[in-house]
Image (cartoon, rainbow, N blue to C red):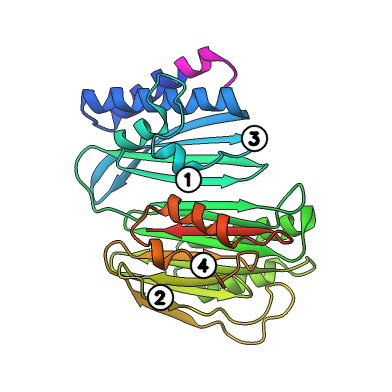
Amino acid sequence: MRDRSSVAEARERVRACAREAGLEPADVERMAVAVSELGQNQLDHARLGTIACTGVVRGGVTGLEIRAVDRGPGLIAPATAIASMLPPKGLGVGLAGVRRAVDELDVDVRTGESTTIVIRKFRAAVARQPEVAVLGRGVADVSGDTAAVWRDDATLWVAVVDGAGHGVEAREAADRCLHTVQQAAQAGEEDLRALLDAAHRALRRSRGAACTVARWTADRVVVCGVGNVAARVVDPAGGVRAAAPLAGMLGVRLPGHPRTHELRVAPRSALVLATDGVSARRDPVPEQVGRSAVHLAELTMARCAKDHDDALVLIAR
């Protein structure tokens, strides 16, 4: 996104991709308006903005995914923006209009680093996968806490990593861990313990990192972790079930085999992964469990993030 002509070019490319995915003409135009809003936001508020569109298939139904990524200060108050409480730019629909136009929306905001917004629209009704919100911030220029989200036809995968210490070296270890886990999973490995074993080997001679990985398919979540990345499932009524990680640090100390936790989930349950920079002493999720993933993430960071540590929370629901 270099200028307004880039926004116009993105609009035409999205129209072509949407038609190829079989979207109805009205939905084609809705996606063109959505990408205009995303592109204009990047021009106004960030730098090095990029937008990519790709075809997706779920349950045999084709659709379109658009991914908008930038380098910038990070979207301020994402839940407020999506709830149409901030003035819109672009074609005037705002992020709230983008949300209404699509079937699913994921948000990943790293304060002082970047914003990623992913939207999906399908040709027909499909089985809903949980939407994901990631919010994070560091005490140095670069946070040692990071996360990744990826999907296949029926499964949502998430991973949260806390690199040991702070700053660039911590982030390098965290990124190496994420790359290893994601690459192995996308190659077909479904055993979460095997993913963490691979990360442990890849992180030798590094600072090390804590990592928790989760796989959400239909009515169950499978979770496995090593180190200080906490995981829990919050039921619609507010009940909480934790999936405790194994004490240790990938690349440095793995004292045994991490336990795999399998948890059944009801519709509108929330999966919460958080680094130890997010205090568990005051948890806003149970009392606000009816909210969207991005709203829960925003509340969690506002109330629970520690001032002296990197902090990141991922919420899927």
The residue labelled by disc 2 is 240
Q: Secondary structure at mark 2?
A: strand
Q: Which of these two is toward me, 197 or 304? A: 304
Amino acid on which the number 4 mark rests in the picture: Val
- Residue 90 picture location, percent across and down: 45, 20
On the rendered structure, is 313 left or right of 200? left
Residue 240 appears left or right of 61 = right
Residue visible at 35% across and 71% down in the picture: 238
Is residue 179 something one can see in this rendering? no
Q: Residue at x 19, y 45 (%)?
A: 125
Give above or below for 306 relative to 14: below
Residue segment shown in magenta: 1-8
Q: Secondary structure at mark 3?
A: loop
Disc nearer the start of the sequence (3/1): 3
Image depth: mark 1 or mark 4 in front: 1
Residue 210 is drawn in which quadrant?
bottom right
- Distance from label 4 to label 2 (Cα)? 18 Å
Q: Position of residue 99 (x, y in %)?
A: 35, 37
Q: Which residue is mark 1?
A: 107
- Sequence-first disc among 4 and 3: 3
Number of other residues with Cα within 10 Å of mark 3, as a class: few under 14, some 14 to 19, many 20 or more = some
Q: Residue at x 45, y 41 (%)?
A: 80
Which residue is the site of mark 4? 213
